[in-house]
Amino acid sequence: MTLQSNDTVKPYQDNWPEDGEQAANPEEKEMSFLDHLEELRWHIIRSVGSIFLFAILAFLNQHLVFHVILLGPTRTDFWTYRMLCKLGDAVGAAGLCVNKLDFILQSRNVGGQFTTAITTSAVIGLVCAFPYAFWEVWRFIKPGLYPAERRAARGATFFVTLLFMMGILFGYYIISPLTINFLSNYKIDPSIANEFDILSYFSTLVTLTLSCGLMFQLPIVAFFLSKAGVIHPALMREYRKHAYIVILVLAAVITPSPDIISQILVAMPLFVLYEVSIGVSGSVVRARLKALSQEIQ
């Protein structure tokens, strides 16, 4: 067909192939390699900018961020300790109540408090900006997926953010206060006082909390690895015992105290998440088999 001078060429077709070809959205256009780099650069700039913005807000609200939130587990009126006391009263175990945290915090360097405020504010900014930062990264990745892959990954930002925040809350309200309580009251000799440097305290709190946030992404990792054909639910069931051992070792590594209770509390949600990951992997495989059977028919 010959185009007339007044004809216009539509840059996109209404029906793009579902399989075998790269999907395209009518609102998208072909981009060169340099265009992709430029697009990626702006996604990264916006992500880093959001982290920087929340970090500044955290630094400007030091009473809320440091005194109320980060130093909360150092006081006996912290929510977790109060719940333990209520639980102890209910079951008749007075030992569960935390009545004393036998340590003091010190800053042993000239710029220790200022440096700690800067680094900790950056971490707070990362946690608060995580949903938006992940959404920016997902916006860059999503156009390169096939239509079926887009449908399968629908809601990725929501579920990744939900699991991350659940892990952060679990680490902050469960793992961190129990670990701090154990370490603050553990003494090899009564004559030795526990005087912790603030950098050591904040690094322990941040490590425990962020580790839980990342570990709670296990079902998401299982989903994408199953989509890529790397793992299979049958394989995960076969190596369940090995995975449990790895989880116990991992729990012992990220828990800085030898307290077996804290290690079990870290490992238990990971056991549950591993079983959930098996179900997620199974659903991916079933969807793939269903799609193949429909193609054969």
Image (tube, rainbow, N blue to C red):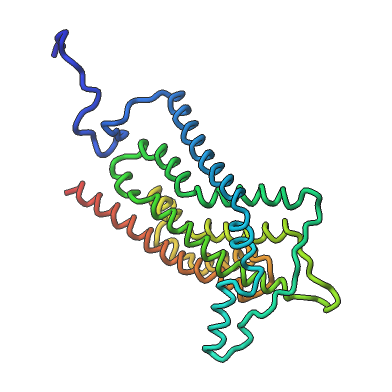
Asked whether 31 or 105 is in front, the reply is 105
Q: In the drawing, does residue 135 fall left or right of residue 200?
A: left
Residue at the spot 50% in from the left edge and 31% down from the top edge: 41
Residue farthest right in this picture = 191
Q: Is residue 285 above or below residue 28?
A: below
- Residue sitting nearer the eye, 146 or 87: 87
Q: Quadrant of residue 51?
A: top right
Q: Is residue 157 left or right of residue 118?
A: left
Q: Residue at point 76% right, 64% down? A: 196
Residue in the image at 83% along x and 79% along y: 190
Q: Position of residue 275 (x, y in %)?
A: 43, 67
Work out whether 180 lies above or below 87. above
Q: Nearer the viewer, residue 199 or 254?
A: 199
Q: Give the x, y percent position of residue 180.
A: 67, 69
Residue 263: image quadrant is: bottom right
Task: Tell me: 264 left or right of 293.
Answer: right
- Report the residue that reaches farthest toward the top: 5
Which residue sits at x=50%, y=36%? 44
Left or right of 185, for residue 158: left
Where in the figure is residue 286, as x and y percent of width and height? Answer: 30, 57
Q: Position of residue 186 (x, y in %)?
A: 74, 75
Quarter of the image that includes the N terminus: top left
Q: How many marks?
A: 0
